[in-house]
Image: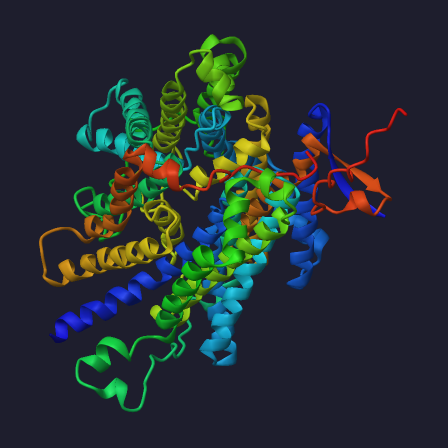
Amino acid sequence: MDAFVNLIALTLAAGTPLALAALGELVTEKSGVLNLGVEGMMTVGAVAAFIVAVNTHSPWLGIAAGAAAAAVLALVFAFIVLSLMANQVATGLALSLFGIGLASFVGRDYVAKVIDGLPALHLPVLSDLPIVGALFFSYSPIIYLTLALFALTQWVLTRTRAGLIVRAVGESPPAAHAIGLPVIRVRYLCVLFGGLCSGLAGAYLAVAYTPLWAEGMIAGRGWIAVALVVFATWKPWRALAGAYLFGFVTLAQFQVQAWGTAISPQFLSMLPYLATIVVLTLISRNALTVRLNAPVSLGKPFHPGD
Amino acid sequence: MMLRLEPRPEPSRLAVWLSPLVALLATLAIGAAIFAWLGFDPKNALAVFFIKPINSWYGVSELLLKAAPLMLIANGLALGFRANVWNIGAEGQLILGALGATGIALAFDGVEARWLLPLMLICGTVCGIAWAAIPAFLRTRFRANEILTSLMLVYVAGYLLSFLIHGPWRDPEGYNFPQSILFSASALLPTVGAEGRLNISIFFALGVALLCWLFVKKSWLGFQMRVAGLAPTAALYAGIPANRSVWLGLLAGGGCAGLAGACEVTGPLGQLTASVSPGYGFAAIIVAFVGRLHPIGIVFASLLLSLLYLGGEAAQIQLGLPSAITGLFQGALLFLLLGADVFIRYRLRFVFSRLASSDVTPSPEPAPPTLPASHH
């Protein structure tokens, strides 16, 4: 039983950064903007969070700084693709390359530093309950925050006027513009939300999950998150399930290594990336699934004056 | 008064070529600001970064040496980018190229023969093509997004390299360092010039640039691919198969990256090491855009990006800055370029009227219904 509870805890922890980043990208894409800079924003979020956490000794301030730093990058991206109407694929790539370069530049003095990570939740009586306490009341606060964000996003997207506006803007910007919706402003906000979530995901990795800063520590999680959005066919709950599934795959790699099998660690490390390819292929195989669910205007620039 | 973007009737050809210069100047300005902020004299620091590395013949030969892989890969990628095929996994295809060449070198270790080097280069190219064929197959057969699959394969290639270099291909007498044995003389590219490490890979790169130029400007297939990129629906109507663009675009990039990887291990490295490439596969994406996806532009852009690598190394040695500043400059350059590109299709207008200034103005309300003029 303990092993099972432990496995659940590890899966949630490993899946959370993917879930957060995927949620942000999902909302961004719902508004019709494809931001391939998730990897860069997560990296900057991680380094900013770590630097602030080291200097202030406050993991919470670090997490706030990580989210804010990534949000600033997201705004730069939004300005270039929304106000200057640049190609979204190329600009997203630029954001990833820039973010990774920026992070290793500012983080060079922090590589070997150690911090006290964000402590896990501890409620007086509840957390001490046998099994139930470990299973429900003793994770990192960010894990609960992630679940709350998913519930909130699901509700806003499907049940509120704001969600309807976001979806309208993503499906048909000319129509949304024609009925007086501020297309560009809505897209700015969605990109900003994506940035905040990516930053939070990176910050969680640097301040709570590992906790440390190293170049390349995001290790493609941002790209996997982008793939998860397709896998989830733009539905928040499926993205959450997908993120935990991938969290489990990353874990399986350590688990198998612990059993001392003859498989080289490098081949086990390939698993999450290979799994991403397989999952992406399976979901894309059915053209209708993707076409029916993808926001119609995804990746296409819109200029209200045209 | 407001600034407003207004569509141009025709894309500006001047802006197409001015935009990289504007982006470069802005990058330099940002660089100067960063240097000043870090407490260096900006003029001196910029000179260390951009001028000192190339004020000797040795410096120029290093510039060309690093420009060669960038030029090769960027030309291959540009073929795909023009057709809207986004191969961003060139780094992985480069690694596979290095592995392919190394495999041959290890299999024929000790053999002194003229065919060895060409065989290594061919094997490297084929391995790069094979690695790029995976996303091409998944895209054409299952519609899987090639951006994500090609990028995931970069990580897989990295682990494959790590496995080989720590395992079966490690030099048994190399004190456990993760590297292969040194290649024999007949497995190395001939160098060019009296001093320095420059080798004939620069001629491969220039040759590929020429081939790409001929392909794009003079061949029917190249024309079809451009149409497929510019107007996919029109291309479909004209009976141009969309899948062929995907295959060609990806395989061209993979082949060029594979050759570049083979040239790294047979050239400056002389063996397989744990870090085959300082991110050439990603930098080449920037080269392709800065060079306007045009073979001649790419030649110049690869020199610029190569200079950024040299500048980063010089700044590390002489100023004690982390070499990561190269990545920072690379990213900033592409960012600024894409922003500056807005002036290709739009121009700035000063707008004085309040109504026309907002980009969120709803379309004009239909005019209030007026009674039809009566004709009593």
Q: Which residue is drawn at 26% across and 77% down?
A: A136
Q: Residue at x 57, y 56 (%)?
A: A189
User: Can residue A192 be spotted in the picture?
Assistant: yes
Question: On the picture, is A110 further left or further right than B140?
Answer: right
The quadrant of the image that shows the C terminus of chain B is top right
Seen from the viewer's position, the closer of residues B290 and B223 is: B223
Question: On the picture, is A147 further left or further right than A88?
Answer: left
Q: Residue furthest bottom?
A: A124
x, y percent for residue A21: 41, 57
Residue A158 lies in what quarter of the image? Answer: bottom left
Seen from the viewer's position, the closer of residues B297 and B313 is: B297
Question: On the picture, is A136 further left or further right than A214?
Answer: left
x, y percent for residue A209: 34, 69
Q: Which residue lies furthest to the front in this view?
A: B376
Determine whether B333 is above or below B213 in the image.
Answer: below
Question: On the picture, is A17 further left or further right than B7?
Answer: left
Residue A145 lies in what quarter of the image? Answer: bottom left
Determine whether B160 is above or below A120 in the image.
Answer: above
User: Can residue B313 be spotted in the picture?
Assistant: no
Determine whether A283 is above or below A67 in the image.
Answer: above
x, y percent for residue A216: 39, 55
Q: Which residue lies furthest to the right in this view?
A: B376
Seen from the viewer's position, the closer of residues B34 and B44 is: B34
